[in-house]
């Protein structure tokens, strides 16, 4: 009794477009023959083997973990198939499947560790604002201010030109910027310093609180540019008079109120410093993001890249530029306008010294769009270059500078990867002729030698009964869910198995497996493949290893 499978009944032929990391190489349309019960990991392994053969790569030049499978729709990645244990049945026949080669995991980890070391050195070298010590404020008053964050309400009540919404924004790490919080703290310090010089502050014999410069704030620049004021001018004023002169603060009339404000300022500084220690930990494995090049109404892509979690928008522009370097036209050059203004000439000279690719990418507008957006309003512009400022200024194009605050923001935080947001790179119309976008995404079909032979066979070739019996005895590798325990290496491995026919019986029953079980739908599907079988002389001598003389395994059909 033999229960034999139909050739191709457990196999699936998939069309997968492989996109190499080096886009100067053509993309390959691969034909992948895979078991229907295989997993996504098995699919990635098959793609890796075909890609190595297609591009003549060595085993260490392409790793399975550096390949990601994606379903692409309307120039966007609709979903990633990243879980190794998922069944390949999750990919339907109508899906447009791409396999992207990503940056090697080792390269991403090295970049992450380099960032971590730089971050440590930067953190240690940064000047920390001086802690404010309050004047002999009663401990009971301190406990009262600490309870239920009462110091925030007290500090808010001192504000003259700030409403509740503006002040609450300064207490929200996500809604306010670091520079805004530092500048507000610097104003508090300056006001307290002035109050401590007043005649009725009861603090004239003490050393005035040192002003704390905040790097990059307008307040620090004002302190440097303004002439120093003689302290005797403030000493002749009372706290109430000095408070009335202030454009920012109010209600400071007694030394106690000054002590309360000073303690609240100390608590606000502690709040600022605490934000630096509550950052979400960055993953050393990097993040996967997608980007598409937009030229007028034409979209090229999508492209998928694995980048370190620390990459900012400026670095991301450089990464995109390197991926497009091969598409520059031979005469690519960007003209600069002439101007008599010295500052513009310097900017223009700096622009002229850039490579055409760098200048091109720094003029591009970056937008983040959801995968299923139906309106332009759903897209968000990120980076320092926007649609409103893309026009030339005195003949000099507007560029995204690495020092711009918007360009220093982390790309993973600006692009909502959890919601599958895609990054679109909008090239300016005046420079679109400098890059040949048609050269970016060139595909060609690749077939193995066996696939070429099968393609040459006629399509109406039927399956024979001998093909089914031969398929039954073929060597096959066990799947990820059927791994075998090896007594030597003490591990579960994907072993190879092969069935041999040792001796044949006088009467042979052959059963055709005409049903296939889907691990995704959990249903059985009947196979309608036509099988040809001979009426006489079914010769199995090549498959059976032992038989007696005169009893060769040759069979005639008796019944169906």
Image (tube, rainbow, N blue to C red):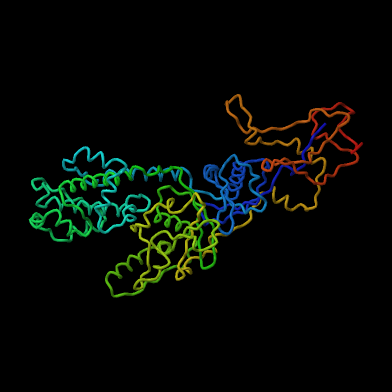
Relative horizontal placement of residue 164, taking residue 286 as reference (left or right)? left
Instruction: Look at the picture and state if 299 lies above or below 137.
Output: below
Q: Position of residue 30 (x, y in %)?
A: 63, 51
Residue at (18, 51) in percent of width and height: 192
Q: Position of residue 151 (x, y in %)?
A: 27, 45
Instruction: Look at the picture and state if 364 lies above or below 546.
Output: below
- Would you say residue 122 is visible in this rendering? no
| Extreme-top residue of the structure | 487
Residue at (33, 52) in percent of width and height: 168
- Would you say residue 141 is visible in this rendering? yes
| Extreme-right residue of the structure | 558
Of residues 89 and 236, which is closer to you in this image?
A: 236
Task: Locate residue 480: give its quadrant.
Answer: top right
Of residues 553 and 31, which is closer to you in this image?
A: 31
Of residues 314 and 488, which is closer to you in this image?
A: 314
Residue at (49, 49) in percent of width and height: 418
Quarter of the rendering occupied by the N terminus? top right
Relative horizontal placement of residue 374, taking residue 89 as reference (left or right)? left
| Count of numbered tags | 0
Quarter of the rendering occupied by the C terminus? top right
Relative horizontal placement of residue 196, taking residue 23 as reference (left or right)? left
Q: Position of residue 139 (x, y in %)?
A: 21, 37
Q: Position of residue 191 (x, y in %)?
A: 19, 53
Of residues 466 and 234, which is closer to you in this image?
A: 234
């Amino acid at each position: 009794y033999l229960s034999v499978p139909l050739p191709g009944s457990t196999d699936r032929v998939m069309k997968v477009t492989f996109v190499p990391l080096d886009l100067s190489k053509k993309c390959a349309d691969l034909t992948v023959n895979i078991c229907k019960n295989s997993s996504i990991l098995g699919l990635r392994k098959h793609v890796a083997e075909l890609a190595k053969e297609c591009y003549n790569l060595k085993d260490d030049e392409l790793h399975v973990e550096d390949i990601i499978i994606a379903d692409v729709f309307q120039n966007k990645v609709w979903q990633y198939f990243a879980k190794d244990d998922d069944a390949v049945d999750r990919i339907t026949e109508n899906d447009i499947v791409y396999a992207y080669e990503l940056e090697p995991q080792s390269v991403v980890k090295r970049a992450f560790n380099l960032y971590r070391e730089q971050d440590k050195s930067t953190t240690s070298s940064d000047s920390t604002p001086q802690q404010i010590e309050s004047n002999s404020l009663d401990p009971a008053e301190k406990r009262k201010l600490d309870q239920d964050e009462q110091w925030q309400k007290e500090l808010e009540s001192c504000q003259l030109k700030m409403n509740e919404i503006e002040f609450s924004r300064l207490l929200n790490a996500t809604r306010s910027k670091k520079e805004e919080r530092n500048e507000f703290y610097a104003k508090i310090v300056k006001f307290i310093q002035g109050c401590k010089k007043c005649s009725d502050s009861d603090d004239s014999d003490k050393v005035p609180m040192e002003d704390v410069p905040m790097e990059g704030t307008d307040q620090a620049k004002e302190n440097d540019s303004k002439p120093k004021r003689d302290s005797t001018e403030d000493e002749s004023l009372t706290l109430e008079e000095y408070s009335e002169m202030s454009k920012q603060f109010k209600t400071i009339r007694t030394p106690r109120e000054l002590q309360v404000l000073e303690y609240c300022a100390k608590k606000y500084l502690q709040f600022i410093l605490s934000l630096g220690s509550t950052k979400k930990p960055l993953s050393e494995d990097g993040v996967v993001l997608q980007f598409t090049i937009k030229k007028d109404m034409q979209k090229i892509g999508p492209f998928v890249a694995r980048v370190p979690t620390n990459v900012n928008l400026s670095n991301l522009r450089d990464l995109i530029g390197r991926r497009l370097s091969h598409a520059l036209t031979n005469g690519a050059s960007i003209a600069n306008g002439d101007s008599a203004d010295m500052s513009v000439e310097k900017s223009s000279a700096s622009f002229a010294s850039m490579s055409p690719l760098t200048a091109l990418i720094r003029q591009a507008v970056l937008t983040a769009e959801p995968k299923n957006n139906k309106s332009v309003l759903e897209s968000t512009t990120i980076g320092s270059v926007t649609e409103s400022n893309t026009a030339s200024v005195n003949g000099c194009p507007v560029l995204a500078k690495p020092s711009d605050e918007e360009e220093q923001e982390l790309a993973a935080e600006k692009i909502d990867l959890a919601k599958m947001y895609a990054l679109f790179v909008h090239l300016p119309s005046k420079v679109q002729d400098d890059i040949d976008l048609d050269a970016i995404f060139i595909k060609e079909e690749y077939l193995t030698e066996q696939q070429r032979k099968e393609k040459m066979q006629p399509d109406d070739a039927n399956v024979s009964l001998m093909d089914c019996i031969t398929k039954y005895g073929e060597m096959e590798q066990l799947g990820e869910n059927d791994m075998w325990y090896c007594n030597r290496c003490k591990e579960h491995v994907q072993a190879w198995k092969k069935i041999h026919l040792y001796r044949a019986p006088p009467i042979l029953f052959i059963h055709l497996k005409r049903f296939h079980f889907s691990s995704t739908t959990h249903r059985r599907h009947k196979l309608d493949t036509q099988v040809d079988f001979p009426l006489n002389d079914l010769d199995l001598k090549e498959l059976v290893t032992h038989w007696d003389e005169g009893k060769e395994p040759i069979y005639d059909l008796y019944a169906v």
